[in-house]
Structures are given as C-alpha cells and as structure tokens.
Amino acid sequence: LVYVNTRMLQTVLVEPKWAGRMTPEDYRGLTPLIYSHVNPYGRFDLDLNDRIDFGRLAA
C-alpha cells in the first residue's frame, strides 16, 4: 500500500508543473509516507526493479 502511494507521488512530482508548486513545507509533509516504514498487513517482499507502469494502467 505504501509502495503504491509512493509510486503515485513519484509519478506526479516528476512533472515540472507539480514539482515547481511544492514548497519545503509540502515536502516535509510527505516525509512520513516516503521515509517511514508502515506495514499494517504483514510482510511483503517487493522487487523494486519491477516498476508499476501507471501510464499504461490509466489508458
């Protein structure tokens, strides 16, 4: 769940339009989601080399 949320944020923030709107306060608000380990459902072994293609899923 956190992995998917993080990937969605990365997809949005890679766009200069949105990245330019982010202030340091906005980035601090993202810190717990990106840098903290949240695992309410047990252990999931992820292959971080296998990326979710959100562009393909949106089509």
Image (cartoon, rainbow, N blue to C red):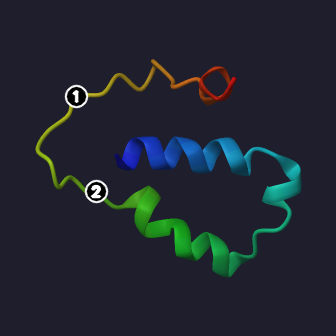
- Residue 50, image quadrant: top left
Q: Residue at x 14, y 48 (%)?
A: 41
- Residue 3, image quadrant: top left
From the viewer's perspective, tell me whether residue 5 is left or right of residue 27: left
From the viewer's perspective, tell me whether residue 15 is left or right of residue 35: right
* Farthest bottom residue in view: 25
Q: Position of residue 19 (x, y in %)?
A: 79, 58
Query: Neighbour class for label 1 at 10 Å: few (<14), some, many (≥20)?
Result: few
Q: Amino acid at mark 1?
A: Asp
Q: Position of residue 9 (x, y in %)?
A: 60, 51
Query: Neighbour class for label 2 at 10 Å: few (<14), some, many (≥20)?
Result: few
Q: Amino acid at mark 2?
A: His
**Marks 1/2: CA–CA distance:** 14 Å
Q: Earlier in the sequence, mark 1 or mark 2?
A: 2
- Local secondary structure at mark 1: loop
Q: Residue at x 66, y 41 (%)?
A: 11
Residue 37 numbered mark, or none:
2
Residue 45 numbered mark, or none:
1
Q: Is residue 30 above or below residue 7?
A: below
Query: Nearest the camera: 4 or 38?
Result: 4
Total number of numbered discs in the rendering: 2
From the viewer's perspective, tell me whether residue 54 is left or right of residue 5: right
Residue 13 numbered mark, or none:
none
Q: Residue at x 59, y 23 (%)?
A: 53
Which quadrant is the C terminus positioned in? top right
Q: Residue at x 59, y 24 (%)?
A: 57
